[in-house]
Amino acid sequence: MIALIIIVVVGIAGAIYYFNYYRGGATGATVRTASGLKYIDEVVGTGASPAPGSSVTVHYTGTLENGTKFDSSVDRGTPYTFTIGLGAVIRGWDEGIMSMKEGGKRKLIIPPDLGYGAQGQGAIPPNSTLLFDVELLEVKN
């Protein structure tokens, strides 16, 4: 009986590993890109993906690693629209949002070199890792 339970548990673990490794990840899995950006898909969208030059509209909340909120379109009640892939936003946003699909929700974990770097910005101290909860509301290709 114990051997059967072990076989079932190992089989389930193997299936999860297969899905995460070979199928490109699952909701809730942390993905690390070559640049050092990390993201976690909370909801995988079903709509269009943006391409460089697309207009995208997002809702977001940005916090520091210590939990201090520094900006939120959600709190303002006004989504943010920008052109993706042209340097209009920090590099971590361009990279992290480019691979989303409309309707998706993702947590971006942006290292300093993809954020505001050694100079910081306003309430963001130098060399800060930034956390963003982003919802991709609309893509206009």
Image (cartoon, grey):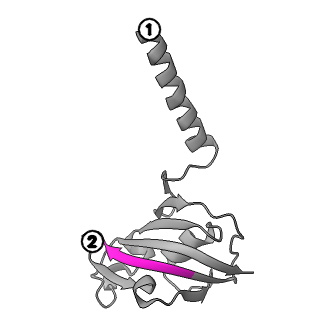
Numbered tag placed on residue 71 in the rendering: none
| Residue reaching furthest to the left | 66
Q: Give above or below for 110 relative to 59.
A: above
Task: Check if mark 2's residue and mark 1's residue have beta carbons within 8 Å.
Answer: no
- Circle 2 sits in a helix, a strand or a loop, which is it? loop
Q: Measured from the top left, where is residue 86 in percent x and y?
A: 62, 85
Q: Give above or below for 9 relative to 64.
A: above
Numbered tag placed on residue 67 in the rendering: 2
**In this rendering, does residue 88 appear at all?**
no
Question: Amino acid under label 2?
Answer: Gly
Q: Measured from the top left, where is residue 34 in percent x and y?
A: 52, 59
User: Is residue 91 rendered to the left or right of residue 140?
Assistant: left
Numbered tag placed on residue 1 in the rendering: 1
Of the two numbered discs 2 and 1 in the rendering, the one whose residue sits closer to the viewer: 1
Residue visible at 59% across and 67% down in the picture: 104
Residue visible at 34% across and 88% down in the picture: 121
Q: Which residues are magenta?
A: 58-64
Q: Measured from the top left, where is residue 116 in percent x and y?
A: 39, 81
Q: Quadrant of residue 56?
A: bottom right
